[in-house]
Image (cartoon, rainbow, N blue to C red):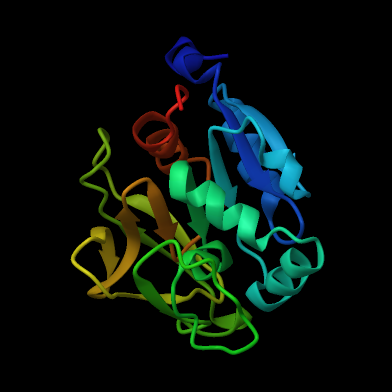
């Protein structure tokens, strides 16, 4: 393990693993020295210091979370801990998903438009500026059926934009991204999450 990652050794980070692309998030967290716990039941969250909700299919994710009785536990966890949502995960963090099939957790004052950046075949790669990270070189960002984020209150901080739309937003210790940072080798987003938002001494 890189010595720079030794400070993450005591961090237990849950990755919601009921649906979607959770495996790559786990790999990146482990590379950064964090302990990964796959979250498949509400009780799995006990002892976690942070949580990542991955990309996937937000309608399916809603059905499974309700089936497994996890919705309220996730909401409760997000009130007291750091949570990061990517793509479909960002949809689940919102207050308004503009789709009756999706029941968001309501942890951020944002609204989202599902698949606003296009269909699967319209997926694209771009580079965005990340002035909030120590390395300010543009971040490779992969958009796959990505949601468009709309900020609904002054409590939400826009950390990065693409074509004048927010693509990384933060509210307290909740972080939402339109794209998939786990699909590149650049670990700056996960590193930022662990260092700046996750708190071990709860």
Q: Is 47 placed left or right of 122 in the picture?
A: right
Q: Is 120 placed left or right of 41 in the picture?
A: left
Residue at image location 40% in from the left, 52% down from the top: 175
Measuring from the top left, give residue 178's x and y in whole percent.
44, 66
Q: Is 61 placed left or right of 150 in the picture?
A: right
Q: Quadrant of residue 31?
A: top right
**Relative height, residue 29 to residue 97 (above, below):** above
Q: Is 119 placed left or right of 191 in the picture?
A: right
Q: Is residue 114 visible?
A: yes
What is the total number of numbered labels drawn onto the structure image?
0
Q: Where, quadrant-wise, is the N terminus in this rendering?
A: top right
Residue at image location 78% in from the left, 49% down from the top: 40
**Relative height, residue 160 to residue 50 (above, below):** below
Residue at image location 76% in from the left, 61% down from the top: 69
The residue furthest right is 67
Q: Quadrant of residue 36?
A: top right
Measuring from the top left, give residue 183's x and y in whole percent.
57, 51
Measuring from the top left, give residue 63's x and y in whole percent.
75, 74
Q: Is residue 180 visible?
A: no
Q: Quadrant of residue 57?
A: bottom right
Measuring from the top left, give residue 125's x and y in whole percent.
46, 65
Front residue of 16 and 153: 153
């Amino acid at each position: 393990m890189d010595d720079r990652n030794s400070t993450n050794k005591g961090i237990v980070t849950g990755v919601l693993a009921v649906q979607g692309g959770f495996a790559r998030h786990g790999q990146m967290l482990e590379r950064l020295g964090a302990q990964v716990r796959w979250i498949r039941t509400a009780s799995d969250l006990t002892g976690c210091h942070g949580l990542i909700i991955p990309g996937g299919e937000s309608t399916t994710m809603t059905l499974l979370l309700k089936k497994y009785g996890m919705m309220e536990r996730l909401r409760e966890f997000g009130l007291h801990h750091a949570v990061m949502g990517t793509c479909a995960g960002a949809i689940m963090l919102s207050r308004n998903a503009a789709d009756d099939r999706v029941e968001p957790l309501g942890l951020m004052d944002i609204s989202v438009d599902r698949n606003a950046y296009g269909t699967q075949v319209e997926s694209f790669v771009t580079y965005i500026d990340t002035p909030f990270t120590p390395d300010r070189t543009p971040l490779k960002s992969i958009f796959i059926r990505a949601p468009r984020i709309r900020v609904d209150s002054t409590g939400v901080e826009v950390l990065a934009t693409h074509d004048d739309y927010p693509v990384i937003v933060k509210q307290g210790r909740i972080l939402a991204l339109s794209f998939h940072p786990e699909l590149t080798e650049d670990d700056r987003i996960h590193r930022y999450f662990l260092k700046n938002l996750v708190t071990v001494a709860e």
